[in-house]
Image: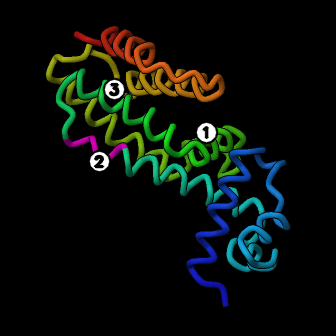
Amino acid sequence: MYDDALRERILGEAAAQLAAGGVSGLSLRRLATAAGTSTNAVYVMFGGKPQLVAEAVERALTEFSRRQAQAMSDIRSIDDLVALAHRYRAWARQHPALYHTWFNQIPFGLAGDHPGELPAVAESLAPVVGVVASLVEAGVLRPAAPEAIVRSLWGAVHGYVALEMGLRDWDDDAFSAHVDAVLRSWAA
């Protein structure tokens, strides 16, 4: 009775509502109307609001991770990590609803008690940790635990992008200087 096209419309509308107003701004009635269905479809297809939110968050993270992974095989230097940071920012700018859905919902445990329990989080970070480990081993980055370096880099890039999105002040040169400074601080 309910097909994949409807599932996609529901998930798209859920992401848009979550990005606009968080979980409290997600109305299943409004969502169903916008998707051209009834609230029953949400319950049948997802189980309820918490499960819908969890799937929307997981989908946002999976899409983001897929885009980042496309660049992973080419990373051999700090300059390649700079390019990856710019890709991160570009994805956030091109997909603000998905980006906000992911980052605004994960900290509240809506998809599990701990963000690290989301399979897509581990999938998203594993390639970066592997690349950083190889750069540490090659002497390009300072000797440190790759996970610690990744957390540092992710925090710096995410924090800047989140502030930028909130301020709507997209300054490419300032972002480039920020990323360069952070990555150079980890250089061997």
**Distance Cα–Cα, label 2 vs label 3:** 20 Å
Q: Is residue 71 above or below residue 119?
A: above
Quadrant occupied by the C terminus:
top left
- Along the horizontal axis of the image, is 108 left or right of 173? right
State the SS at label 3. Answer: helix
State the SS at label 2. Answer: helix
- Along the horizontal axis of the image, is 103 left or right of 134? right
Name the amino acid type tagged 2.
Gln
Give the residue number, with chain letter if any, for mark 3.
Answer: 146
Residue placed at 14% from the left, 22% from the top? 138
Q: Compare residues 104 and 36 and report the one nearer the observer.
A: 36
Quadrant occupied by the N terminus:
bottom right
State the SS at label 1. Answer: helix
Query: Which tag, 3 or 1, sits closer to the chain's start?
Result: 1
Q: How many marks?
A: 3
Image x and y of residue 37, in percent: 76, 78
